Image: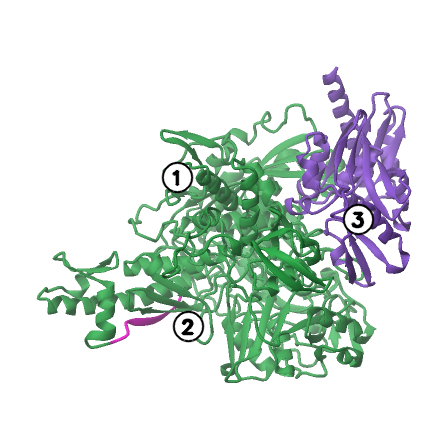
Chain colours: A purple, B green
């Protein structure tokens, strides 16, 4: 249950508040999740006024403030269409107008296409205090054990790689039971993330080339069975979708040549 | 905390708790257009508001977050055009478009849709249909199928751009056939016209008009819904939109176990919590056995339920009731109730229910049997129907086909949760304001439970935010009523979305075995169905739902030749208890369960024998003038009576549907089945034929009263319950047609057990047919009085006119000689001037027949053969529902029904783990279709004139639930050869079949 409500006016003020362990404070992004948390009493720090809501394009990457809402992400011309497509499947219009990228990465489970896609892209997340940049692949496996800082401020990914995703669901906008996201760099580096099972998406492969993508995808979901699908199903289809993604990426790369 | 909110351009200084949600703040301020869907994750969007101009969910946002922002609700938009001496700008153009296009059914999500549309059109004045669907994606609608809301937004956009729009009431009539358009183009594509651009709005369905039907002024026309103006403004029209001093909030403690005895309950800590007014357990209230099924007297099922019991029979069963000053306090009190359970072995598999040694779910001594129920075998109902000589029929067959089929447990998922308010009125009568489909049944059935005579109870049914059978149940009224009796105070009880899933009612899951004998030429010689139906923990609707499964689905195919004269049909069913949430009534009432196996089976037979699937079905289907084969053998717990079916438009439906979907161009066309450049995709096309019923003969009764007012307008009081279907409107249309007035002169009120005549309620697709006939009878009586008085008034003026020859039209009584007297003159004469009388009449109607509607359902799908994922691309339904009283509201029923059935086909199911814990508790896991993922929907009406109804109508509400799942299943088979026997068509099921080949 929520006790106190704070709305700091600056990033520094927010970090100071959140660093005070005695108050049991939690950052409040868009409000799609935290307002319904019950049980333990805690207080919230509303981040809407602290200015971490910018999208910036650099030569080799794009950085997105943790408080950037999904509707802003969709409206921005510099955001890759595949990321926009992921947002449109993951969320409805109302959620897009509330949810922030930072809040989404903290609260979403493995059935999020966007989170799986950003994992494939090897995005980097900046935390305060300290400004430490942590790879999403290093953070996601230990997300339940705590955050690298008190506040996520920025998410950054490279614009060089080609990336696509495929998914399986009961209907086009249902939560997927299987997601395969593949990113491929000009160097040949290929990174495959799988979602649709568990608490967070996982990396199936990160290698200098795409050879063995099908086997790697099978192996990563070797025991990925739950009430929604068996492991045998996920293994088989993940490998097929991984190969389909690679074919699509090769077609894109060929068309660009 | 103290904050200032800017709501609808006005500053509100407020003191709110930090934890308070914006939804609660707004409703406390009286902004009742902001609805609660009972969800907590923002899944349904009924609570949408505009936040700095963009739609957000107020149910997950803290009120404190909104300070410094502009909040808008629908209350800030338009208003009713008539405001007395004060000038009014009328409704906002978007609101008016929603009214005009029939985009409003129950209206619960309408304010949210209007706001979302406003936000869209302010940033994009010329959206495409796809962009409108994206914008509406955050608002779930269980009624409309989204087609008409999308058209409403496109129409509003066109008007706001200054364009012309076509009239709504412009029939798209079809003759023997209409031209197929394989590429219909995108929705809302601006079309060039002579006078500029006209944006197409396709809300009027394709309609093949019955030949014997003469032109009418209101019947057959797209009249706007009579409740649309209040619903589009978000007026406080629903059960929860109600303020009462000292209102207490009820919560229910629910069982964590599937089967357990309550050894002890300690409520002392809960009672001691400040703000708690009452805590009730089974020890505090009388033990009265009853059935929660809202049905006529006597209830055709076992009495096996109690308000509270010392035994719990499913996860979610009731343990205790709490009333407190705030919802939070009531919630906190639930956590303080200490319950000591003796956990019992549980039963989840219906196939094991009747085995020796199975846990007995109802071992109480006060269980009251109905017919063949036997609680010692967990048997809630048993059905054994034999028609003709089935054994001989099988002997005469050249081929025998047998197969087993499964259908899942699914939820009605109305967006308005169950909600009730109870209070003592000034006469110490208990008032129950409740979201029910059956107000008169509620009053009758709850009276003994509360220890009150029926006359001390008044049930008020306001507008209902969808029901679909889920509210044909006396499910919540006792909770609030017991707490009002205990405290003397008004109490509101509103289910959460989780409670809807774990503690209300569902469609019966079934395992169905079919055996069919067929001659080599495709003649069916015998047909046999055995159905194992799972009623869950209580037997509400157990017999009647499952009886309907055979009564409708096994009636369609009687055979041909001599078999047509004497069909051989067997329908056996066992309806068993399990420790799961009870099954109950759900739109279609057992028939969708029956048509999944029957229509999949027919497809298999036609394929195996190399027969054309359409010709094979029509060869064996019922034809006009034949007896309903079950009519001599079974009725819903009553004596059966022979019924001849006079109107069957099935062949015409098939013809129109196959042309609309392009069957002849696609079926068996290999090229059409492939997708260029995507070898993993396969397209398929499927068909299903279905029938339903129209009311229950000799049982369902509807009443109506009509009263003339001073100005020549009329009050129409009906006990029928419009739960969003538009039934109030079609009743008004029939009254208006009979009286010769526009619909706007009919003021409809439904329903209040103190004021409106009895009606059995909204179920069995009966309102237009039964209640409608009652309305017409009452209107005819009123018309007779008007003619008599008009004749006298003409005579006083020296004009001779036989009352029978006086025509009522355009609000006037017209003599054969051409003279006219207005209704307002007649009203003033009758009420104030001469031989004063109140011109009014009451009438009721019961039917000896239940003429079935028929339909042909077509589906197109694309299957990903790597993953098994199915995308449904197109649904076409051609329906014979008799004469269509209102084509726009009727087509809304078909579109919404097909959409619910689409979920049944591919995405909806309720799954339990080995302990009976439910997997689905919200709209995240239980997926109902969003606006932005819908297939193309087409509705065609092929009219017949049903002679047993005054305007020739039959039912329309339930039949769209029957055919989509089997048509999709058959299309999947056509696409990739996978013959599914169970739904939903999950990707893994299809993948398994593909890999087993």
| SS category of the residue bearing label 2 | loop
Pick the front one: B63 or B461? B63
Is residue A254 among the parts visible in the rendering? yes
Label 2 Cα neighbours within 10 Å, binned few <14 / some 14-19 / many ≥20: many
Which label lies toward us, 3 or 2?
A: 3
Q: As drawn, which residue projects farthest toward the left?
A: B798
Pick the front one: B328 or B752? B328
Q: Measured along the vertical axis of the image, is residue B855 above or below residue B267?
A: above
| SS category of the residue bearing label 3 | helix
Which residue is tagged 3? A107
Q: Which quarter of the figure has residue B708?
A: bottom left
Q: Position of residue B251 (x, y in %)?
A: 69, 71
Side of A142 where B701 appears, left or right: left
* Disc 3 to disc 2, C-alpha distance: 54 Å
| SS category of the residue bearing label 1 | loop
Q: Position of residue A24 (x, y in %)?
A: 86, 58
Tag shown at residue B757: 2
Question: What's the chain of the residue with tag 2?
Answer: B
* Disc 1 to disc 2, C-alpha distance: 40 Å
Which residue is tagged 1? B166
Magenta residues? B837-850
Is residue B599 among the parts visible in the rendering? no
Tag shown at residue B774: none
Label 3 Cα neighbours within 10 Å, binned few <14 / some 14-19 / many ≥20: few
Residues at discs 3 and 1 both on one chain: no
Pick the front one: A172 or B380? A172
Q: Please tell me which residue is depicted at 54% across the width and 50% down the height of the picture.
A: B897
Which label lies toward us, 1 or 2?
A: 1
Q: Position of residue B588 (x, y in %)?
A: 55, 56
């Amino acid at each position: 249950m929520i006790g106190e409500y704070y709305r700091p006016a600056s990033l520094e003020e927010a970090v100071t508040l959140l660093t005070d362990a005695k108050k049991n404070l939690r950052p409040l992004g868009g409000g799609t999740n935290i307002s319904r948390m019950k049980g333990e009493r805690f207080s919230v720090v509303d981040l809407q006024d602290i200015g971490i809501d910018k999208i910036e394009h650099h030569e080799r990457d794009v950085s997105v403030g943790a408080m950037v809402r999904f509707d802003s992400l969709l409206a921005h011309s510099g955001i890759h269409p595949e990321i926009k497509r992921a947002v449109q499947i993951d969320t409805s219009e109302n959620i897009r107008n509330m949810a922030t990228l930072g809040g989404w990465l903290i609260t979403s489970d493995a059935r999020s296409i966007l989170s799986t896609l950003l994992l494939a892209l090897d995005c980097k997340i900046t935390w305060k205090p300290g400004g430490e940049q942590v790879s999403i692949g290093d953070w996601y496996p230990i997300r339940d054990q705590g955050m690298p800082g008190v506040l996520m401020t920025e998410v950054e990914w490279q614009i060089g790689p080609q990336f696509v995703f495929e998914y399986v669901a009961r209907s086009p906008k249902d939560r997927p039971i299987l997601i395969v996201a593949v990113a491929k760099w000009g160097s040949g580096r290929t990174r495959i993330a799988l979602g649709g099972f568990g608490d967070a998406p996982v990396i199936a492969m990160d290698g200098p080339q795409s050879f063995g993508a099908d086997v790697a995808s099978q192996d990563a979901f070797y025991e990925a069975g739950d009430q929604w699908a068996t492991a045998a199903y996920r293994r088989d289809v993940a490998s097929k979708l991984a190969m389909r993604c690679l074919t699509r990426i090769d077609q894109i790369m060929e068309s660009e040549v | 905390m103290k904050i200032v909110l800017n709501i609808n351009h006005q500053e509100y200084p407020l003191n709110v708790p930090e934890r308070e949600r914006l939804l609660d703040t707004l409703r406390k301020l009286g902004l009742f257009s902001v609805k609660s869907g009972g969800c907590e994750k923002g899944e349904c969007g009924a609570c949408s508001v505009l936040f700095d101009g963009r739609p957000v969910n107020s149910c997950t946002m803290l009120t404190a977050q909104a300070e410094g922002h502009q909040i808008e609700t629908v209350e800030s938009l338009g208003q009713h055009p008539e405001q007395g001496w004060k000038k009014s700008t009328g409704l906002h153009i978007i609101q008016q478009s929603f009214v005009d296009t029939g985009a409003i059914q129950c209206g619960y999500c309408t304010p949210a849709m209007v706001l979302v549309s406003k936000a869209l059109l302010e940033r994009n004045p010329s959206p495409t249909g796809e962009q409108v669907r994206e914008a509406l994606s955050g608002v779930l609608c269980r009624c409309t199928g989204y087609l008409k809301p999308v058209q409403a937004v496109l129409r509003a956009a066109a008007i706001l751009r200054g364009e012309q729009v076509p009239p709504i009431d412009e029939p798209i009539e079809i003759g023997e056939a209409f031209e197929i358009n394989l590429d219909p183009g995108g929705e809302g594509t601006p079309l060039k016209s002579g006078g500029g651009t006209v944006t197409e709005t396709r809300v009027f369905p394709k309609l093949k008009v019955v030949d014997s039907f003469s032109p009418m002024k209101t019947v057959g026309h797209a009249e706007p819904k009579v409740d649309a103006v209040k619903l589009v403004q978000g007026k406080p029209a629903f059960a929860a939109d109600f303020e009462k001093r000292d209102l207490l909030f009820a919560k229910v403690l629910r069982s964590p176990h599937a089967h357990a005895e309550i050894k002890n309950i300690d409520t002392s800590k809960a009672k001691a919590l400040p703000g708690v007014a009452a805590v009730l357990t089974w020890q505090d209230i009388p033990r009265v056995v009853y059935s929660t099924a809202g049905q006529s007297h006597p209830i055709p099922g076992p009495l096996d339920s109690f308000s509270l019991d010392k035994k719990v029979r499913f996860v979610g069963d009731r343990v205790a009731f709490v009333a407190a000053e705030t919802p939070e306090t009531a919630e906190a009190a639930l956590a303080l109730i200490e319950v000591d359970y003796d956990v019992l072995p549980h039963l989840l598999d219906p196939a094991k229910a009747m085995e020796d040694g199975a846990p007995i779910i109802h071992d109480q001594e006060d269980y009251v049997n109905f017919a063949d129920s036997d609680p010692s075998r967990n048997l809630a109902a048993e059905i054994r129907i034999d028609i003709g000589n089935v054994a001989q029929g099988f002997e005469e067959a050249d081929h025998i086909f047998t197969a087993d089929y499964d259908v899942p447990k699914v939820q009605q998922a109305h967006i308005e949760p169950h909600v009730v308010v109870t209070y003592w009125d000034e006469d110490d009568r208990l008032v129950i304001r409740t979201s029910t489909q059956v107000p008169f049944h509620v009053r009758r059935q709850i009276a003994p439970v509360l220890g009150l005579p029926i006359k001390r109870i008044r049930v008020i049914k306001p507008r209902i935010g969808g029901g679909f059978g889920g509210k044909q149940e006396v499910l919540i009224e006792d909770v609030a009523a017991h707490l009002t009796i205990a405290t003397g105070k008004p109490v509101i009880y509103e289910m959460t979305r989780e409670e809807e899933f774990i503690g209300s009612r569902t469609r019966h899951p079934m395992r169905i075995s079919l055996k069919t004998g067929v001659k080599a030429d495709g003649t069916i010689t015998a047909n046999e169905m055995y159905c194992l139906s799972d009623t869950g923990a209580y037997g509400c609707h157990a017999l009647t739902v499952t009886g309907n499964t055979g009564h409708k689905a096994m009636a369609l195919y009687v055979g041909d030749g001599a078999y047509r004269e004497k069909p051989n049909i067997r329908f056996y069913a066992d309806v068993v208890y399990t420790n799961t949430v009870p099954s109950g009534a759900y739109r279609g009432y057992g028939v969708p369960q029956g048509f999944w196996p029957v229509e999949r089976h027919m497809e298999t037979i036609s394929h195996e024998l190399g027969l054309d699937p359409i010709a094979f079905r029509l060869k064996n289907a019922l034809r006009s003038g034949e007896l309903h084969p079950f009519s001599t053998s079974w009725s819903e717990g009553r004596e059966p009576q022979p019924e001849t079916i006079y109107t069957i438009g099935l062949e015409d439906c098939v013809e129109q549907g196959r042309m609309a979907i392009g069957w002849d161009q696609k079926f068996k066309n290999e090229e059409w089945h492939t997708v260029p450049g995507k070898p993993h995709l396969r397209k398929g096309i499927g068909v299903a034929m279905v029938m339903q019923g129209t009311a229950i003969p000799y049982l369902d009764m509807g009443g109506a009263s009509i009263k003339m007012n001073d100005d020549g307008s009329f009050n129409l009081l009906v006990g029928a319950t419009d739960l969003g279907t538009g039934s109030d409107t079609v009743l008004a249309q029939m009254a208006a047609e009979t009286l010769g007035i526009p619909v706007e002169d009919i003021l409809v009120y439904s329903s209040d057990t103190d004021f409106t005549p009895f009606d059995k309620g909204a179920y069995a697709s009966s309102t237009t047919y039964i209640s409608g006939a009652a309305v017409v009878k009452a209107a005819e009586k009123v018309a007779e009085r008007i003619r008599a008085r008009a004749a006298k008034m003409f005579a006083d003026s020296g004009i001779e006119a036989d009352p029978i020859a006086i025509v009522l039209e355009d609000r006037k009584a017209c003599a054969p000689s051409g003279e006219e007297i207005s209704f307002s003159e007649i009203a003033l004469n009758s009420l104030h001037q001469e031989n004063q009388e109140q011109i009014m009449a009451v009438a009721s109607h019961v039917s000896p027949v239940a003429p079935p509607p028929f339909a042909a359902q077509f589906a197109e799908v694309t299957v990903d053969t790597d993953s098994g994922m199915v995308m449904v691309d197109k649904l076409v339904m051609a329906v014979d529902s008799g004469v269509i009283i209102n084509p726009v509201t009727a087509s809304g029923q078909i579109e919404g029904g097909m959409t619910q059935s689409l979920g049944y086909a591919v995405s909806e199911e309720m799954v339990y783990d080995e302990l009976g814990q439910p997997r689905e508790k919200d709209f995240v896991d239980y997926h109902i279709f969003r606006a932005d993922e819908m297939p193309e929907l087409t509705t065609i009406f092929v009219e017949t004139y049903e002679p047993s109804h005054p305007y020739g109508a039959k039912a329309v509400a339930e039949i769209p639930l029957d055919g989509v799942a089997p048509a999709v299943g058959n299309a999947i088979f056509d696409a990739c050869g996978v013959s599914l026997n169970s739904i939903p068509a999950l990707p893994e099921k299809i993948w398994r079949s593909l890999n087993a080949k």
